[in-house]
Amino acid sequence: MLPIGVAVEQKRFPRATVAFVTANFVVFLCEIVFFPFLIDEQVRVLTYGTGSLNPFALFTSIFLHASCGHVFFNNVFLWVFGPPVEDRVGPKLFAVYYLGAGVAANVLQAVVDAVHAPERLTYGIGASGAISGIMAIYLYRCWHTKVKMFIPVMFLPVTVRVPAVPLMVFFFVKDVVGGFSSFSSGTNVAHWAHVGGFLFGLAVGRVKRYGHEAAVENCETALMDKLRSGGGWDGLKDESTLVRLLDLSPEDPERHLQLAQYYTAKGEKAKARDSYRHAVQKHFVRNPYYGACALLEMMDAGIGTLQPHHHLRAAEELSGAGSAEEAYRVIRPAIGDGATGVLAERAYLLYLKLCRELYKDEEVASGIETFAKRFPQSVRNKEAAAVVKLAPGGIFPKKKEIAAPESARKTFEEPEHVTKHEMRLATCFNEFFAIFTDVRFFSLFLLLLPLWFLFPGYVIFPLVFITTGLLRIDWGGLLWRSQANEEQQRREAEAATLLNRAALADRSDNHAKAAELYEKYLAVDQANIQARYSLARIYENRLGDLGSALRHYRKLVEHAPAGHPYHAEAREMLSRPKRRE
C-alpha cells in the first residue's frame, strides 16, 4: 500500500520539499560511491544510536539510507505529503519541522534502545522519522482531505481514496505495534523512530492550532464551491456553512460581512443589519477603511444606517483615503436634526469640508448658517465659517495605502508565480515518483528477483526503474504530437491562470487589476457567463464605469441561457431607466 497523491490545492512551488528529496538522493549516491572506501568506524560517526551519540549525527543520519528501496519509498511518502504541508506552513517552518521531527525520532529510538537493551549498540539512519512528523502535521492541517493509495493486487493496479484521519492513525498504530514487537523479535525497522517523529508532528500541530486552520479551510472551500456553482448568495440553501465559519473565527469581520451579504440576498434585513454592525465594528479595530466600506455596502443594499459615531468614523476613513464622494454619502445620516454634542459638531464640520471638496457651494453656505444656529456655543464656529475659503483638492490628506484584511490575504492570496523551470521540475518529480506506482514496475521487480542474488540492489533497482520509465513513455505521441496541440494546451493553461488570478484580485479588492484580467480571459473564452457577470458587477459597483458594465450586461444576455439567473438580472439591469445610455 503506497500513497500516490492527495486532493489538496497548492499555491506555491514546494522548494523545501524538492530540496530535501534531492538531498536524500544525492547523499545516497555519495554513499554508493564513497562508503565502500571507508571503514565502519568512519561511517558510524554519521549515524545516531546508542553506538554513536554524536550530536552532529542527529542531523546527518536523517539523510542516510540503507538501500535503494529505503531511499526511494521514503521519498515517495515525502513527495506526497510534503508539498501540501509546505504550502500551508511555508518553506522555512517546513524545514524546521522536518529536521525537528528527524531529531526527535532519533532521540526516542536511542532512548528506547538504551532502556530495553543497554548492552547492545545500535545505529540508526533514514528520513522515515522526519517524514512521519510531516505526516502527523498533515493529519492536523489537512484532516478533511483524502489520500489516493496504490495497492498492487495480483499484478492489477488498484487505487482507492482513503480519508486522511484513519490512514494516518493506521500508520501510527502499526509503528507502535511494531515497536513493541521489536522487544521480543529483532527487526531492522526503527519503529520507535517513526513514533517519535509522529509524536513531534502531533505536538507541533496542537501547539500551532493547525487543526483549527484546517477546519476553517474546509468550510471556506465548501462555501466557495457553492458560490462558484452559480446563483451567488441566493444559491445557498441555508446559512449553516457561514455560521460554522463564524463559530470558528468569531472575531474575523469578513465572516460577519459574508453572513450579512447572505441575509441581504435572502431579504432578512434585521439579521443583515446586525451582521453588518458586527462587521463594521470589528473592521474598525483591525482595518478601519474596510469598516467604512462595509458600512457603505450596507447603505447601498438598503439595509439602513448605524449609530452616528459609526458614520463619522467611516467618513473620516473614506475622506482620508481620497474617496470624498463616498464619505459624503456616509456622513449624511450622522448630521440629522436630532444630532447634538461634540460628536455631532465633528460630523457636521466634516460634512461641510466634504461639500467644499465636491464643489457643493450652496450646501456649504446653508450648512455654515445651520452650524452656527445648531451649535452657537461651539469652539468650532470659526473653523466652520472658514470652510468656504478652503481650496478643493487639498482639504484632505493624500490618499493613504490600504492593506487588504488579513483573512482575505491569507485565504484568497494569489498563487505564487511559478517559473517554467520550476514547473518542469515539478512535472519531472511527479513523473519520477509515478513510476513506483506503475504495475509494470512491480512486474519487472518480481521477474528480476532471482538476479538479486547475483547483483547488488543499487544495480537491479535502477534497472527496473529505468525500464519502467521507458515503457511509460508514449513514443507514438512524441513522434506524432503536433505543434498545434501543444499551442492549444498552452492557451488553455494560460486562460485558466488568468481566470484564477482575476477572481483572487477581485476578492482582495484590487478591482482594477481584476477587471483587466477578466477582460484578457474573456478575449479567449467569450462564453464564460460567470466571468462575464463578475466583470460587469466590478465595472458597475466597484469602478463606476457604467458604459463598460452595460456592454458586458448585453453580452451576458447573448450568452446566458434564458432561464439562467444572470440572464434575468442582466435584462433587468438594462431595462432600468437610470441605466440607459
Image (cartoon, helix red, strand yellow):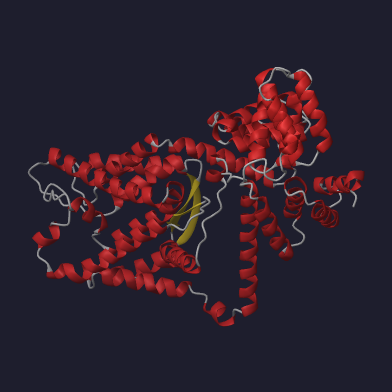
Q: Is residue 392 left or right of residue 197?
A: right
Q: Position of residue 461 (x, y in %)?
A: 31, 68
Q: Position of residue 428 (x, y in %)?
A: 45, 67
Q: Residue at x 24, y 72 (%)?
A: 455
- Residue 580 is at least partly visible in this image: yes
Q: Position of residue 344 (x, y in %)?
A: 70, 22
Q: Residue at x 34, y 39 (%)?
A: 173
Q: Residue at x 65, y 71 (%)?
A: 488
Asked whether 356 or 343 is in front, the reply is 356
Q: Is residue 74 left or right of residue 476?
A: left
Which residue is most to the bottom? Answer: 479
Position of residue 320 relative to residue 530, above or below, is above
Position of residue 180 relative to residue 563, above or below, is above
Asked whether 393 or 239 is in front, the reply is 393
Asked whether 244 or 267 is in front, the reply is 267
Residue 263, quarter of picture: top right
Residue 2, quarter of picture: bottom left
Q: Is residue 508 left or right of residue 475?
A: right
Q: Residue at x 29, y 39 (%)?
A: 176
Residue 77, quarter of picture: bottom left
Q: Position of residue 29 (x, y in %)?
A: 26, 68
- Residue 262 is at least partly visible in this image: no
Which residue is most to the left? Answer: 119
